[in-house]
Amino acid sequence: MGAGRRIILGATSREADAFLALVARHGSPLLVFNPATLARQYHLLSEALPGVALYYAVKAHPNEYIVTTLDELGCGFDVASAGEMDMLMGLSIPGHRTIHTHPIKKDREIRDALRFGATTFVVDNPDELAKLAPYRDRIGILLRVSFRSAQATVDLSRKFGCDPDEVAGNITAAEQLGLHIKGLSFHVGSQCTHAGKHIEAIDQCRDLMLAISETSSAPMSTLDIGGGFPADYDLAGIDIGEFCAPIRKALAALPDDWHLLAEPGRYLVAPSVISITTVTGKSERQGVTWYYLDDGIYGSYSGQIFDHAVYPLQVLKTTETRRSVLAGPTCDSIDIIAENIQLPELEIGDLVIGHQMGAYTAATKTRFNSLPDARFVFVESTS
């Protein structure tokens, strides 16, 4: 758990004062949201993908402050459940600004989405098309195509999407049900390290859509390129414009009148949230110093299990380091945030900061041991 993890020793006096002030005011543990960072990420990705409508993947962090910030920026929303739609409805965000991307849905979910005002649904097989047939006059459909990606941290095409050679059969099944598939969608996987699979998927979808449109009375003209845009877990600096340059080139080869969508989540929200935890206990075990924190794997660090993320960590001290372990607050031995790392000697009450913690952290937390959640607060800056 220590290999490949960025450890930051020390902080500027301004940073340290800001962290300490937040804990003094709100307690610990905290998840601290910076809306200015989220706005910056949104604008950078918008500039990197001109002409592509962005729909935030609400599942990445379904928080009303995050959603409201993106709403004010003009972002759309990718939803996958009635619960996510309920949150948007509570914030007066209309359904026509969403796409419902879960390929498998109960009939009640479809009816709830239609009442909400959602009109674009994603499917990947004939059984799901049949579920939508009763609502054919009220919906638009995107067919999800699978493009397996070994280089993605999470291969989302393992569970969803039809094979490219199954697209024509699904189109035929839709026509027999009186349904029109207006375009294709794909998701090449989460936390991609390069854009090669995006290019492959765009090129294949272009060829499929053009071929089908030549023989169809209702041609396809929408392409959803999904997500996969990476967060900077190494704090090495990711130039999203450079990452997306080959994607822009591939998109430029598409017909000018096609409608293009993307479903970013991690890239937008990961750097927008930090975690602040407090050392609540310490011990020496087999020559290694163990520090016990008030948040851990069952809480805000849940993404280390479910999302395979390795979050950069920061402590405020810069003194000589020793081999250390950071453990969470539960009684379970799996609740270890990091081991075999080098840290200065910490004392009870010292702070540990987690960076890039906006995506798939609070979203996958549990209430194991009935411990309280990290408190969510927002600030304009922590530096």
Image (cartoon, rainbow, N blue to C red):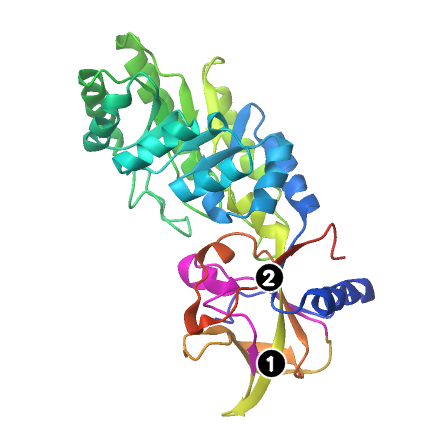
Q: Residue at x 54, y 32 (%)?
A: 93
Q: Residue at x 41, y 38 (%)?
A: 197
**21 left or right, relative to 337:** right
Q: Secondary structure at mark 2?
A: strand
| Distance Cα–Cα, label 2 vs label 1 | 17 Å
Q: Residue at x 59, y 34 (%)?
A: 71
Instruction: Give the percent coordinates (x, y) of residue 152.
Output: 41, 48
Quadrant location, the C terminus: bottom right
Residue 176 drawn above or below residue 274: above
At label 2, the amino acid type is: Arg
**178 left or right, relative to 277:** left
Instruction: Give the percent coordinates (x, y) of residue 361.
Output: 50, 57
Report the residue marked by disc 1. 280
Report the residue marked by disc 2. 375
**Viewer can see residue 192:** no
Residue range highlighted in magenta: 291-316
Kindly indicate whether the residue at mark 1 contacts the one at mark 2 (C-beta within 8 angstroms): no
Q: Nearer the viewer, residue 326 or 71?
A: 71
Marks 2, 1: nearer the viewer: 2
Q: Nearer the viewer, residue 177 or 161?
A: 177
Please tell me which of labels 2 and 1 falls first in the chain: 1
The disc at residue 320 is: none
Q: Quadrant of residue 82?
A: top left
**Viewer can see residue 66:** yes
Residue 363 drawn above or below residue 19: above
For the residue carrying disc 2, how many other residues have a C-alpha within 10 Å: few (<14), some (14-19), or many (20+)? some
